[in-house]
Image: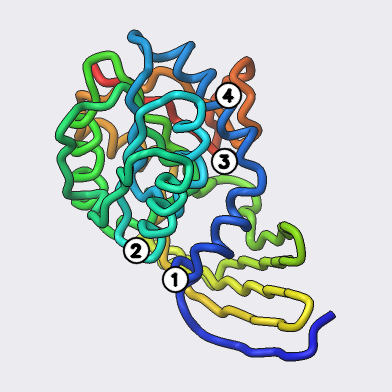
């Protein structure tokens, strides 16, 4: 398929074009679910939307084009530049900033916020997670919602150990493989490995990455929420993104989308 192969070790977040394709290829299901949540769970019309850890803004650009006022933050400057360049290219303000999702304030409060693909679990400690939720609560108007998607650690049954998927756009193809290297339950940290095989007509680039995700059982996550009483659970769904099919979390549940409402 290619004439030249190169292998590098680094963060997938430093390759925003590849990251955006890989995690943005199924954006429509997430986008439709967000809008359905705005309608069902928010007590006010949603006009202003914020995404902590926004990355490349794969959903922010779609929301902007749908008429919402959008903003976001992320620690990775390359991803923020990619996000802002795309917003600007379509005529919208460069509204993403380099910032910590556990330490931020918005100049204007949002009606809704979202974080749908486990970025929340990058926060390494309970204190950081509490700080993040407090920042979100402070950033939302009363009656606003925060849509938070995470993988919980099941307490019964087998847990998902690996995942593979492929995304294509034009002459660019990316095969990805992510696997668990193990869980340190004392420190509540899961170590993940990830390989991206990036193909163009003349090149094969392999990117090897390692990541650490904080773990949460259902009890641990509910304990966390009790520390931020301004946010209450309004709905619980899964990664099928079906607004008409809420779920009940059981001991084997892994994929969860919490809809939290600001009181």
Return the residue at label 3.
255
Q: Position of residue 65 (x, y in %)?
A: 50, 31
Q: Nearer the viewer, mark 3 or mark 2?
A: 2
Indicate the colouring scheme. Answer: rainbow
Which residue is depicted at the point 54% across and 18% down? 36
Whole-angstrom CA distance, mark 1 to mark 3, is 26 Å
Toward which corner of the image does residue 224 lie, by quadrant? top left
The mark nearer the N terminus, 1 or 4, is 1
Toward which corner of the image does residue 189 lie, by quadrant? bottom left
Other residues around mark 1 within 10 Å, as few (<14) / some (14–19) / many (≥20): few
Return the residue at label 4.
247
Which residue is depicted at the point 73% across and 60% down? 166
Kindly indicate whether the residue at mark 1 contacts the one at mark 2 (C-beta within 8 angstroms): yes
Instruction: Determine whether, in the image, residue 52 is placed left or right of residue 245.
Output: left
Position of the N terminus by quadrant: bottom right
Element under label 2? Answer: loop
Q: For residue 14, which numbered disc appears in the image?
A: 1
**In the rendered view, would you say 187 is above or below 38?**
below
Q: Is residue 152 visible?
A: no
Extreme-right residue of the structure: 1
Instruction: Determine whether, in the image, residue 168 is placed left or right of residue 225.
Output: right
Return the residue at label 2.
76
Whole-angstrom CA distance, mark 1 to mark 4, is 35 Å
Q: Nearer the viewer, mark 1 or mark 4?
A: 1
**In the rendered view, would you say 68 is above or below 193?**
above
The mark nearer the N terminus, 3 or 2, is 2
**In the rendered view, would you say 185 is above or below 121?**
below
Tell which of 259 and 87 is nearer to you: 87
Toward which corner of the image does residue 113 lie, by quadrant? top left
């Amino acid at each position: 398929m290619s004439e030249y192969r190169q292998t590098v070790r680094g963060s997938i977040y430093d390759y925003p074009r590849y990251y955006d394709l890989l995690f943005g290829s199924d954006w429509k299901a997430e986008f439709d679910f967000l809008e359905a949540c705005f309608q069902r769970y928010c007590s006010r019309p949603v006009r202003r939307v914020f995404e902590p850890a926004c990355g490349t803004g794969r959903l922010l650009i779609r929301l902007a084009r749908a008429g919402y006022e959008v903003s976001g933050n992320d620690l990775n400057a390359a991803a923020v530049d990619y996000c802002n360049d795309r917003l600007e290219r379509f005529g919208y303000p460069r509204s993403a900033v380099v910032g910590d999702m556990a330490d931020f304030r918005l100049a204007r409060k949002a009606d809704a916020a979202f974080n749908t693909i486990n970025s929340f679990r990058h926060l390494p400690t309970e204190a950081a997670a509490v700080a993040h939720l407090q920042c979100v609560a402070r950033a939302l108007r009363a009656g606003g919602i925060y849509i938070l998607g995470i993988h919980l650690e099941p307490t019964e049954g087998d847990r998902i150990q690996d995942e593979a998927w492929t995304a294509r756009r034009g002459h660019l193809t990316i095969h990805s493989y992510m696997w668990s290297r193990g869980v340190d339950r004392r420190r509540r940290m899961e170590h993940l490995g990830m390989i991206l095989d990036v193909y163009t007509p003349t090149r094969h680039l392999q990117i090897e990455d390692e990541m650490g995700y904080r773990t949460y059982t259902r009890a641990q996550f509910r304990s966390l929420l009790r520390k931020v009483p301004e946010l209450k659970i309004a709905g619980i769904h899964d990664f099928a993104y079906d607004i008409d099919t809420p779920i009940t979390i059981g001991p084997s549940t892994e994929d969860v989308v919490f809809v939290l409402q600001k009181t």
